[in-house]
Image (cartoon, rainbow, N blue to C red):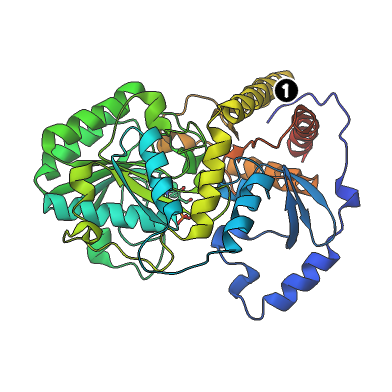
Amino acid sequence: MTMTPNLPAREVLADRRTGRSEEIFLQGRAHTPGGINSFTRALTPPLVISRASGAYIFDADGNRYIDYHAAFGPTILGHCHPAVNQAVVEVISKLDLVGIGSSELELELARKITENVPSAEMVHLCNTGTEATYNAVRLARAVTGKNRLLKFQGCFHGSHDYLCMNVISSADRVGKLDPCSAGMLPQAVNQTLVAEFNDLAEVERLVEKEGENLAAIIVEPIAHNIGCVLPHKSFLEGLRHIASERKVILIFDEVITGFRHALGGYQAVCGVTPDLTTLGKSMANGFPCAALCGKRELMERFSTAGGDVIFAGTYNGNPMSAAASLATIDQLESGEVHEHIFHLGEEMRNALSAIIAQLGAKAFVTGFGSVFVIYFMEPPVNSYADLLRNNSEVDKAFRRELIARGIMVNPFPLKRNHISASHTEADILATLEIIRSSLIKVARD
Ligand SMILES: Cc1ncc(COP(=O)(O)O)c(C=O)c1O
């Protein structure tokens, strides 16, 4: 990377203490594999978080970070949002988990989703995005009587065997089935076809070959698990057309895009309506809540409505998550949150592009709404295949540098950053200064 460093760095690295984090982590690692509960949470030196508030998180040593990791996206309002937390406190003073019948809260939440999400005629609640996509696949198989699935390279839909493959594949695995884990059932993995994002011709070829056996096409409408690969308008419209023609179920996995990009999800932005939609993350600002929604005739196949497709879960629709989600939606309804986070997102992307141009860095900025990402390569990016040109060593070093200087981002290359309603102009300006000095530093090393 060639750059012309011209501004001094504001070094917070030297101040960062790590002793207490390391102590707690090393003790905990004896009982928790790797000392973490989800494999993408590892950091060196280890990080133990003790407090979160608004746009900031604080570690056990008292270091403060401006947070763009955002727990992979849920905290759209910022951490420990008072209105959301208050709603949860109110509900737990009178109701916890009952597991029989339903609560008014969960039914009201479903109604709100049908009011906002174009594809949602009916809604089922669960707790994680993984459960939502798993149930969506089972429903699609039941209604079509077919087994095969089509997903896209770079998209992630949770950790179950049906779809946990071909996310950030090494170059030699692109174009082949690339399961993310040992122990996945080969019979399940082999039922899934993989195409490149934005490549409608490849989808047509695969559907021509496998159309008779295809139950569902599942897609993140923006490929956010590899940063931010935007769909060509014709791509999502084309998927809709192919699915309707072939009587295949079209599933939009809006676990990231839902609520964050619009109250109605990205489908409300792009004007393409899928048959089924999965939601999660931003819907409850950090509380565990997810949903599967879609056409009435499909949703009524669930055993909950007397149909033959089981839908079950001890914590489904629990009052705490439902209250958190209703309070989050309440905050989003006026449109002010989206206005604020889209404005800061635009400002961040524009300023980053200017810094990159000024430094002459081999990098570019992209994103949508409140999401921004820097790729260390030349544009364009239309699919994962293009991202194989990303300089992942520089990307990793840059992320390490940001974290060391008090900007919390996902430590893995290609991963996106999120702005919340709690971020301010001052946070963005402070972040830009640190990004500038970090770019200079990684260019020098
Ligand atoms: C698009 C998408 N779908 C599904 C999931 C799985 O959600 P969860 O981690 O809540 O199971 C994720 C998680 O990152 C996701 O990004």
Q: Where residue 9 appears, x then y in whole percent?
A: 86, 34
- The residue tagged with tag 1: helix, strand or loop? helix
Residue 376 sits in quarter: top right
Q: Nearer the viewer, residue 316 or 427?
A: 316
**Which residue is label 1 attached to?**
355
Give the residue at x 86% y 26%. 7
Q: Is residue 108 above or below residue 28?
A: above
Q: Nearer the viewer, residue 413 or 267?
A: 267
Amino acid on which the number 1 mark rests in the picture? Ile
Horizontal side of residue 80 vs 292, given as left or right? right
Horizontal side of residue 63 vs 98, given as left or right? right
Give the residue at x 55% y 34%. 332
Q: Nearer the viewer, residue 400 or 320?
A: 320
Q: Nearer the viewer, residue 115 or 401?
A: 115
Q: Residues within 10 Å of mark 1 (few under 14, many from 20)?
A: some
Q: Where residue 65 appears, x then y in whole percent?
A: 77, 47
Horizontal side of residue 212 vs 309, given as left or right? left
Q: Where residue 343 appears, x then y in whole percent?
A: 63, 23
Number of numbered markers: 1
- In this rendering, does residue 409 appear at all? no
Give the residue at x 11% y 54%. 145
Residue 207 sits in quarter: top left
Q: Is residue 298 above or below residue 61?
A: above
Residue 344 sits in quarter: top right
Residue lying farthest front?
94
Image quarter in which the N terminus is found: top right
Residue lying farthest left?
212
Image quarter in which the C terminus is found: top right
Q: Where residue 205 appears, x then y in whole percent?
A: 18, 35
- In this rendering, does residue 441 appear at all? yes
